[in-house]
Structures are given as C-alpha cells and as structure tokens.
Amino acid sequence: MPLPHEQAAIERAQGRQRERLEEAAALLDQLRATYPGADMQQLPSDVRADALRALRAFHPAMRPFGIAELALLLMLTVALALMWFKPVRVFRCEAQGTGLARCVVAERLFGLVPLRQRTVEGIADASTSQRSTTNEARDSDGVTRTTTTHIAELSFTSADGRPLWSGSESHLIGARFEQIGADVKELTSQAPSGRIVRVQAIWPVLLAGTLFLTVAASPLGTKLGLELRNRGLIPQAVYTAVFYWGTLLVPLLLSGAAWLLVLLGKDPPGIVAALL
C-alpha cells in the first residue's frame, strides 16, 4: 500500500500524472518490501536510480531561491555581519608590575568563537569619559524629533602619557567602560597581583543578530536538507538531526551563550572567567 502522503498525491492527480504516480508508488512499495528499513543510501546501486526517480515523483524539485528564501538569506547575512563587525568584547586584565597593568582585548563571535584580539602592555592609567550627540529629524507632519545618543569612551595610556588603546561605544550591556577603567586603575595602584575578566556588547546589535539568525537559519537549513534528502544524497536521519533540529538548536544555543556571558559580564563567575 502507498504511504498516506503518496496516496493523497495520487488521488489529487489526474490523467498521465496519476498513472505516473501510481507506477512510482508501486515501485516504492516493492522496494520497501524487498529492503525493509533501508534508506536510499543503503539500496543496491542497480536499483537506487529507479528509487530516486520514483521518490522525486512525489517530491518535485523546489525552487532553490524564491523571494522568501532570498529574504531569509539577506537576514542571515545581516545577522552574521552585525556579529562580525560588532562582536562580544572581552577584557582580560592583570597587574604587570608596580604601577602597570596588561590587558588582552579580545573580540569573540557570540562570545565563544575568537575573531580578533590585541594585547596592551604597560598600562599606567585608564581614563573614561562620556559625550552626547544630538540629531534632529523632521517627520512627514512637520514635527521635529530630537534623538540624543550617549557615547562612552575608554583609553589606556602608558607612564609617559602615550596612548595605547582606546574605544568608544554606545548602548553597552554588560561591563561598562567606567567599571573597566576603575578596575584597571585598581590593578595599577596595588602590588603586582590580581586579575579581572569583563565582558560587554552593544545590545541593539546583539538583539538584532539573535533575532535575524534564529529566524533565518532554521527554514534555510530545513529547505537545504529537504533538497539533499529528496535527491538521495543524505539519509532521513541526517536530515532530521542536522538540517531540521541542528539549524534550529545551534543558533539558539549560540545566541543564548552570548546573552549569558554579557549579562554576567560585570563580574563573571570564576569558572566562566577561566573559559574566557
């Protein structure tokens, strides 16, 4: 007997299309009886081609790039670009000697995958400041709207006042520049001991990257997996584990890890700090 979805397709078809589906269903029934429990990759090579043709009769080729897929691909590209150019930032600082500190400023994709890092040595002072920028925009009703953005700045300098590293960001979540500056100053003011780990990110970037990634990755992965499965290139088990569940769970786990690290970023527990 044909499977339920095969029988439904046969009943919907008419004329030559119905005959073709009935022939394909009969061949698939025969293969299931002859090779019970076998997937496409386990069939003998001399019958695999016929089995693939019969299977494709019930799974017509899907357009690889429709408007919906292009929109999802664009969302995925934007998500990865945001997380690449404005990733989670990790400060690992320690006392280097009397009056000096050393910091490793690392940028990590989702807080886990290393992208870039810079070691800053001989820090004698850490200074912070804030400035505001104001933008005005007039809407279609002629109403002027004013937006003020507060930008925090952090800079490390050497004993002779030479700039070593500086950064400026807005909408930070996790460790603020003011806290990092105070922590580094404390490292330079005591005997050569101590170590700090601080994590921060730009929350609008992290939020947008999380939403776009989780929304786009799963349907794109599922569609790709269906194409590969229907062509007999992967078995059903691989499609289910990798392309169905994997493309759903991996983005969720990566995004969840990034948010957890950032929310703990003001003073991460020892076990988390050791991993960073």
Image (cartoon, grey):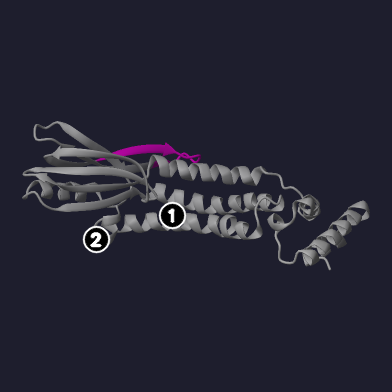
Q: What element carries label 1?
A: helix
Residue 172 showing in the rendered view: no
Examine the image and state in which quarter residue 152 appears: top left
- List x then y, in percent, for residue 65: 66, 42
Q: Which mark is residue 270?
A: 2
Q: Is residue 138 magenta?
A: yes
Q: Which mark is residue 15?
A: none
- Quadrant of the drawing holding the N terminus: bottom right
- How far, Cα to Cα, is label 1 from label 2? 21 Å
- List x then y, in percent, for residue 69: 63, 45
Residue 213 showing in the rendered view: yes
Is 179 placed left or right of 31 in the picture?
Answer: left
Image position of 120 with respect to 52: above or below: above
Q: Is the magenta stretch mostly helix, strand or loop?
A: strand
Residue labelled with disc 1:
254
Is 176 placed left or right of 248 in the picture?
Answer: left
Is 119 placed left or right of 20 in the picture?
Answer: left
User: Which residues are the magenta region?
Assistant: 131-145
For the point 11% across and 40% down, the residue is 124
Q: Earlier in the sequence, mark 1 or mark 2?
A: 1
For the point 81% across and 52% down, the residue is 50
